[in-house]
Image: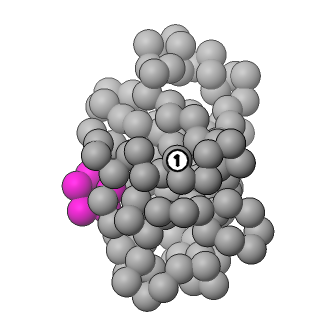
């Protein structure tokens, strides 16, 4: 199973703080699955993505983040998803068009809506997947 991962609202709670359990979440995912950045912070260049995250995370997590693969997309994040393989997509929000594309591929349930504002410990729920 592939994992697609957004940053803002998922790994980062806000502009100043990482989300609770984000270190454990990254460790769990990277050690178990192929993980891809699916975020505006990474379009083809994961080095810049990791550099951006260095101010939030400690070195052990940063080392793991270097294993996360880049994606490339133009308008909609769904352009980067490989629909031929099972996946989970962790993101705080979808565009209406992205939601429709997921429905067309019978994959709407592959989107995991994260809302750190409602549940600051939400990521701990996904340490068991």
80 or 110: nearer the viewer:
110
Residue 102 spot, x, y in % from top left: 53, 21
Residue 55: image location, x then y, percent: 63, 84
Vertically, is 115 above or below 120?
above
Report the residue marked by disc 1: 122
Q: Residues within 10 Å of mark 1 (few under 14, many from 20)?
A: some
Residue 51 position within the rendered picture, expressed as x and y whole percent measured from the top left: 58, 82
- Residue 83 visible: yes
Query: Is residue 42 something that shows in the picture?
Result: no
The quarter of the image holding the C terminus is top left
* Residue 75, quarter of picture: top right
Q: Is residue 93 left or right of residue 63?
A: right
Residue 85's image quarter? top left
Query: How far across and down, in percent of the image, does residue 4 sit?
Result: 45, 46
Residue 106: within the magenta? no
Position of 124 relative to 42 (above/below):
above
Instruction: Name the residue nearer the viewer: 66 or 115.
Output: 115
Q: Residue at x 53, y 13 (%)?
A: 103
Q: Does the stretch in magenta take in 32?
A: yes
> How would you classify the magenta stretch by its main secondary structure?
helix
Q: Which region of the structure is painted magenta?
A: 29-33
Residue at horizontal 54 percent and vertical 53 percent from the top: 121
Determine the secondary structure under disc 1.
helix
Q: How is the image coloured?
A: one colour
Q: Is residue 61 above or below residue 38?
A: below
């Amino acid at each position: 199973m592939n994992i697609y991962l957004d940053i803002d609202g998922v790994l980062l709670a806000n502009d100043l703080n990482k989300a609770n359990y984000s270190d454990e979440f990254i460790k769990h995912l990277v050690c178990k699955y192929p993980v891809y950045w699916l975020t505006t912070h990474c379009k083809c260049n994961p080095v810049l993505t990791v550099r951006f995250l260095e101010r939030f995370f400690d070195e052990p997590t940063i080392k793991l983040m270097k294993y996360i693969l880049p994606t490339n997309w133009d308008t909609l994040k769904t352009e980067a998803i490989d629909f031929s393989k099972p996946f989970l997509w962790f993101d705080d929000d979808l565009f209406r068009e992205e939601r429709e594309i997921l429905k067309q591929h019978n994959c709407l349930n592959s989107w995991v809506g994260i809302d750190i504002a409602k549940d600051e410990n939400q990521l701990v729920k996904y340490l068991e997947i």
